[in-house]
Amino acid sequence: MTASGSAANPVPVITIDGPSGSGKGTVAQILATELGWHFLDSGALYRILAFAAQQRGIPLDDQAKLADLALTLPVTFSTTDAKITLDGVDIKDEIRTETAGNAASQVAVIPSVRSALLARQRAFRIAPGLVADGRDMGTVVFPEAPVKVFLTASAEERARRRYNQLIEKGLDANLPTLVADIAERDQRDTTRTVAPLVPAMDAEIVDTSELDIAQTVTRVRNLIRQRLSM
């Protein structure tokens, strides 16, 4: 297989953006593993930042302290066992709650926080390649990426998926509340002044409302093969 990146950085990047519950994280991780590439869950960075701030007693509206924390956040991702570690401790379950997601959405609107995390996100671009998922990977972080995908699904379908995940874990869940929470987060993410959640001009938009993960992976894999010499 061969692939190419930009002239400035020959390491290729595949960006997979979209709202919460669209399947982008799972799809990105599967493809990164298949390709043997690095994986960046940029949304987790904001969840981890919010989690770390709360652990340290930093208010989620303290822009200066949040930006400072973002610059030194000790986080690593693993494609082999799906671990997300902060200070050497796996916190993937702690940051996947609805509370963590809402907290992440709050800190993500702060320009100084996004600026502080920008260089850290770009540093994940390491040979042989990177699969990056998030909300502004193709528009802001890696605008020169040769493959850009935007996954979406209806708010009702994304809420249903989240509801099933919570029930499977033995947690309480209320479907109407989840729909409302997702709609509110979508509104916040798509209307923020800095890096709003929108597809890149050259992104392939894939609606996953009627697709399962395997079907979505196949769609994106085929796109990768079309865009890259693989």
Image: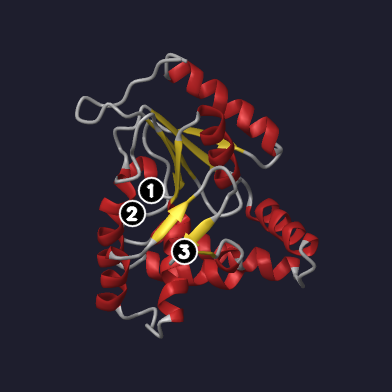
Q: Tell me: residue 215, above or below residue 121.
A: above
Pointer 1: residues within 10 angstroms few (<14), some, or many (20+)?
many
Q: Which mark identifies residue 88?
A: 3
Q: Residue furthest front?
A: 88
Residue 196 at x, y percent in the picture: 37, 54
Q: Nearer the viewer, mark 3 or mark 1?
A: 3
Q: Are marks 3 and 2 in contact (CB under 8 Å)?
A: no
Residue drawn at x 30%, y 38% as measured from the top left? 143
Q: Which mark is residue 195?
A: 2
- Figure check: 103 above or below 121: below
- Asked which secondary structure carries label 2, the reply is loop
Is residue 196 positioned above or below 127 on the image?
A: below
Left or right: 164, with 107 as reference point: right
Q: Which residue is mark 1?
A: 136
Q: CA distance from mark 3 to mark 1?
A: 27 Å
Residue type beneath disc 2: Ala
What amino acid does circle 3 point to? Gly
User: Where is residue 117 drawn, in percent x and y?
Assistant: 31, 58
Q: Amino acid at mark 1?
A: Asp
Marked residue nearer the N-terminal end (3 or 2): 3
Q: Secondary structure at mark 3?
A: loop
Q: Are marks 2 and 1 in contact (CB under 8 Å)?
A: yes
Q: Nearer the viewer, mark 3 or mark 2?
A: 3
Label 2 crowd bin: few (<14), some (14–19), many (20+), radius 10 Å:
some
The structure residue drawn at horizontal position 73% and vertical position 63%, both measured from the top left corner, is: 166
| Total tally of numbered discs in the picture | 3
- In percent of the image, x 67 and y 66: which residue is there? 178
Q: Earlier in the sequence, mark 3 or mark 1?
A: 3
Q: Secondary structure at mark 1?
A: loop
Residue 90 point in image, percent of width and height: 55, 62
